[in-house]
Image (cartoon, helix red, strand yellow):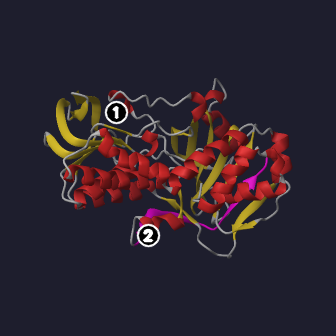
């Protein structure tokens, strides 16, 4: 590891990998540091992504990235009734369940092939700030601490985002603004091939949901997420997950247990500073309604890499120069969906089981153009617009014309 680079990337997930790939591919010296001993582990998400967004980043898909292809979704109401959300054309592949171990490692490999260096089990333990500028990080690697300087540092270190705090940015997520999650990778279970399942209700997951995401034949990610402020003794995400598994898959076998958090609050007030760009979950850029964040991390990481290249070429990586990153993602469709879906999320978490049953039982095999939570919300508005305030209806009108999958 050298003691100076053009760009230092903190975190080796999809956001950090895309940022490094772009910067290194433009001829900059780039270093990725990942605190864990392996890229892609532990998996801290359900691994689902829309099929339509991947061509934005890749000319072709590597088959080993895909654990399962998704064709429709099943929604289970609190009373146990259910319905399918199906694409308009039968047989369409509307989404994938990734194998993040392969996917994340290949993204970092692409960055390394472009010229970046990558160091695992390398932890940023402090920021180097001089004269109001971030100048790099203090890294702990191989049992030693050293200063590594950079013109631009990209913080892609996830929901905890300790590095942003080292830089003086309050990245603390409020308890009601984070979903605490627990997930098993299970085998020997009966599942519907090509179908993802969401279960809602106070019993299954108060103000959250349980999910089943197929990973192959008789194998799936089975998880539960609830708001942090609803977690407590005997009522943590894993407690609800164990109850859900005991009810639905009593003979199933758990191969892995994964826990973590997802920010479902509003993004950071500002995602740049002098010499710093914050991306992905570290910037709170996951979708507030669904918690999805793989696309968001890749989009913001790629954009961060592009802005870093542009600013370094101009020899100006001040906050004002890097603000192009902050402005661009906020004015993009991604930024709009995050902003408006936050308002919708705030309504849905307040619905009780009777309201959810009444709404969901009114829907039967609805057919939509794409599998997305927006498509579902749009159908709910048609059935019962009275549950939404004029402000929410305005948000939905915006989403209708600018929808990305949520």
Q: Position of residue 216 (x, y in %)?
A: 56, 62
Q: Residue at coordinates 44% horizontally, 69% vertically from top-left?
A: 63
Q: Position of residue 382 (x, y in %)?
A: 80, 58
Quadrant in the rendering for residue 235: top right
Instruction: Please give the label number shown on residue 229.
Output: none
Q: Residue at coordinates 55% horizontally, 28% vertically from top-left?
A: 174
Report the magenta residues as a range: 60-77
**The C terminus appears in which quarter of the rendering?**
bottom right
Would you say 120 lies left or right of 161 here?
Answer: left
- Mark 2 to mark 1 CA distance (whole Å): 34 Å
Would you say 282 lies left or right of 227 here?
Answer: left
Q: Residues within 10 Å of mark 1 (few under 14, many from 20)?
A: many
**The N terminus appears in which quarter of the rendering?**
top left
Q: Residue at coordinates 34% horizontally, 50% vertically from top-left?
A: 304
Q: Which of 250 and 183 is in front in this view?
A: 183
Q: What element carries label 1?
A: helix
Tag in front: 2 or 1: 1
Residue 304 appearing in the image: yes
Q: Nearer the viewer, residue 403 or 353?
A: 403
Name the N-terminal-most of marks 2 and 1: 2
Instruction: Please give the label number shown on residue 163.
Output: 1
Q: Nearer the viewer, residue 109 or 392?
A: 392
Would you say 120 lies left or right of 229 here?
Answer: left
Instruction: Please give the label number shown on residue 63.
Output: 2
Quadrant in the rendering for residue 160: top left
Q: Which of 159 and 382 is in front in this view?
A: 382
Q: Is mark 2 on a helix, strand or loop?
A: helix
Q: Where is residue 209 in the image (x, y as percent from the top left)?
A: 67, 44
323 shown above or below 133:
below
């Amino acid at each position: 590891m050298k003691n100076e680079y053009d760009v230092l990337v903190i975190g080796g997930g999809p956001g950090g990998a895309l940022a490094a790939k772009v910067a290194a591919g433009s001829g900059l010296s780039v270093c990725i540091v990942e605190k864990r001993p392996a890229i892609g582990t532990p998996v801290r998400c359900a691994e689902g992504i829309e099929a339509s967004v991947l061509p934005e980043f890749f000319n072709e898909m590597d088959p080993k990235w895909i654990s399962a292809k998704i064709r429709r979704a099943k929604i289970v109401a609190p009373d146990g009734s259910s319905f399918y959300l199906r694409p308009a054309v039968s047989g369409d592949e509307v989404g994938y369940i990734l194998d993040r171990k392969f996917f994340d490692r290949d993204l970092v490999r692409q960055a390394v092939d472009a010229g970046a260096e990558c160091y695992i089990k390398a932890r940023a333990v402090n920021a180097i700030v001089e004269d109001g500028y971030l100048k790099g990080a203090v890294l702990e690697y191989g049992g030693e601490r050293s200063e590594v300087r950079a013109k631009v540092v990209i913080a892609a270190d996830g929901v905890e985002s300790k590095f942003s705090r080292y830089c003086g940015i309050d990245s603390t997520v409020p308890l009601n603004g984070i979903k605490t999650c627990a997930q098993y990778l299970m085998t020997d279970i009966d599942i519907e091939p090509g179908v993802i399942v969401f279960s809602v209700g106070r019993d299954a997951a108060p103000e959250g949901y349980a999910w089943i995401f197929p990973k192959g034949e008789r194998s799936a990610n089975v998880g539960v997420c609830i708001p942090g402020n609803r977690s407590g003794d005997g009522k943590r995400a894993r407690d609800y997950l164990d109850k859900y598994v005991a009810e639905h898959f009593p003979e199933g076998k758990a191969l892995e247990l994964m826990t973590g958090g997802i920010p479902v609050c509003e993004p950071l007030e500002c995602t740049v500073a002098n010499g710093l760009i914050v991306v992905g979950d570290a910037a709170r850029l996951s979708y507030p309604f669904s918690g999805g964040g793989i696309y968001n991390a890749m989009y913001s990481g790629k954009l961060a890499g592009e802005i870093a290249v542009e600013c370094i070429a101009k020899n100006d990586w001040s906050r004002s120069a890097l603000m192009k990153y902050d402005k661009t993602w906020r004015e993009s469709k991604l930024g709009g969906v995050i902003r408006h879906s936050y308002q919708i999320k705030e309504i849905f978490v307040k619905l009780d089981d009777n309201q959810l049953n009444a709404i969901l039982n009114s829907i039967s095999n609805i057919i939509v153009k794409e599998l997305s939570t927006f498509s579902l919300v749009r159908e709910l508005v048609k059935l019962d617009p009275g549950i939404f305030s004029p402000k929410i209806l305005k948000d939905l009108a915006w989403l209708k014309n600018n929808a990305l999958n949520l």
